[in-house]
Amino acid sequence: MSKLDDLREQTRQKEVVIRCRHCGLNGDWRIDNKNAKLYLSKIIDLLSETQIIDHEDIAWGMKVDKHWKGPRYDKCDISYPGIVCKDAPNPYGKKYRLIDGNHRMAKMTDMNITKSCYYVIEYAILKPYFVYTP
């Protein structure tokens, strides 16, 4: 079973919700100045090939403050590619915005890994999948 097939199976078993909101010191991650959610099950079929991307080109939620620690950090498997959105708005003005993989990114940062594989989705393709919330 490929990593992508495994990810599809995981989303069938449990819905993964990515939240886009203002996070204090970690920046404003909202979409169009609105809080939003993204359901992984709705975008999973948009994923296909991976690309190796330099982590310096990726904006992710815990660049400021401490890295995410705890059981999810300990259990995360960095061999699974993350998901990034190309040209999406982000507080750091980076080329890519991390959609899924904060714990993996934190772990790779702690391991001094500077590049890894990601599924890439263009912002124009992903934008209709955001659900705006109060």
Image (spheres, helix red, strand yellow):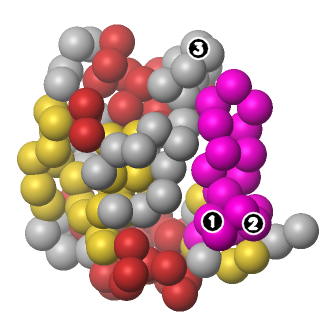
Picture quadrant of residue 17: bottom right
Label 3: element kind: loop
Circle 2 is placed at which residue position?
Answer: 34
Circle 3 is placed at which residue position?
Answer: 66
Tags 3 and 2 in contact by the CB under 8 Å rule? Answer: no
Is 37 colored magenta in this rendering?
yes
Circle 1 is placed at which residue position?
Answer: 31
Tags 1 and 2 in contact by the CB under 8 Å rule? Answer: yes
Task: Decide: is 90 above or below 39.
Answer: above
Badge nearest the viewer, 3 or 1: 1
Picture quadrant of residue 32: bottom right
Magenta stretch: dominant secondary structure:
loop
Any part of residue 59 in sight: yes
Give neighbour class at mark 1: few <14, some 14-19, many 20+ (Cα, 10 Å): some
Picture quadrant of residue 64: top right
As measured in the structure, the alpha-carbon distance from the residue carrying label 1 to the one carrying label 2 is: 5 Å
Q: Amino acid at mark 3?
A: Lys
As measured in the structure, the alpha-carbon distance from the residue carrying label 3 to the one carrying label 2 is: 25 Å
Q: Amino acid at mark 1?
A: Ile
As measured in the structure, the alpha-carbon distance from the residue carrying label 3 to the one carrying label 1 is: 24 Å
Give neighbour class at mark 2: few <14, some 14-19, many 20+ (Cα, 10 Å): some
Q: Nearer the viewer, residue 105 or 90?
A: 90
Q: Which portion, as a residue range, is magenta? A: 20-38
Q: Nearer the viewer, residue 7 or 82?
A: 82
Q: What residue appears at the point 72 percent right and 52 percent down from the top-left corner? A: 21
